């Protein structure tokens, strides 16, 4: 199996830098491992030789489309953008007295 330790560390450092540690993420895990509801994932597809970025919804079903990238930086940027949008969306829900997708201290901090 291909190991992406350096790329994984780059993304994890960005997650920490943004204060997103409490978000549900999966960074370069097998597509069938550690799946959670409302999770944002980045993986590498060996068959296609491409990075893939996507989100899961309730019951860990696919939400939206799967984006594919040939290079790491484009995939990383798309992954981080999805996290930014997750924070904005759920912060807005909390601000409007609606339930967020899941509990995170970030939602209250970003209001």
Image (cartoon, rainbow, N blue to C red):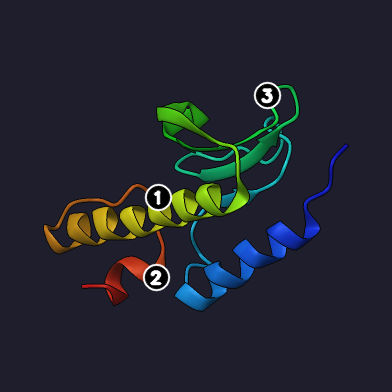
Callout 2 secondary element:
helix
Q: Do the residues labelled 1 and 2 touch (CB within 8 Å)?
A: no
First reached walking from the N terminus: tag 1 or tag 3? 3
Callout 3 secondary element:
loop
Q: In which quarter of the image is the C terminus?
A: bottom left
How far apart are labels 3 and 2 at the CA level? 37 Å
Q: Where is 66 relative to 94, above or below?
A: above
Residue at the spot of label 3:
48
Residue at the spot of label 1:
82
Residue 62: % across, % down: 46, 27
Residue 89: % across, % down: 25, 53
The label nearer to you, 1 versus 3, is 3
How far apart are labels 1 and 3 at the CA level? 22 Å
Q: Dot 3: few (<14), some (14–19), or many (≥20) neighbours within 10 Å? A: few
Indicate left or right for 49 with 2 as reference: left
Which corner quadrant of the image does residue 69 belong to? top right
First reached walking from the N terminus: tag 1 or tag 2? 1
The label nearer to you, 1 versus 2, is 1
Q: Dot 1: few (<14), some (14–19), or many (≥20) neighbours within 10 Å? A: some
Q: Which residue is drawn at 41% across and 27% down?
A: 65
Q: Which residue is drawn at 55% across and 70% down?
A: 14
Q: Dot 2: few (<14), some (14–19), or many (≥20) neighbours within 10 Å? A: few
Residue at the spot of label 2:
105
Q: Are marks 3 and 2 in contact (CB under 8 Å)?
A: no
Residue 60: % across, % down: 51, 31
């Amino acid at each position: 199996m291909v190991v992406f330790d350096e790329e994984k560390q780059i993304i994890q450092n960005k997650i920490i830098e943004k204060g997103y540690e409490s978000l549900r993420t999966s960074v370069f895990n097998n597509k069938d491992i550690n799946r959670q509801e409302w999770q944002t994932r980045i993986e590498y597809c060996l068959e296609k030789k491409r990075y893939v970025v996507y989100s899961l919804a309730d019951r860990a079903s696919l939400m939206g489309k799967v984006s594919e990238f040939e290079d790491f930086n484009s995939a990383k940027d798309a992954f981080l953008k999805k996290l930014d949008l997750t924070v904005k969306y759920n912060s807005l829900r909390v601000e409007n007295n609606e339930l967020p997708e899941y509990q995170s201290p970030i939602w209250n901090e970003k209001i």
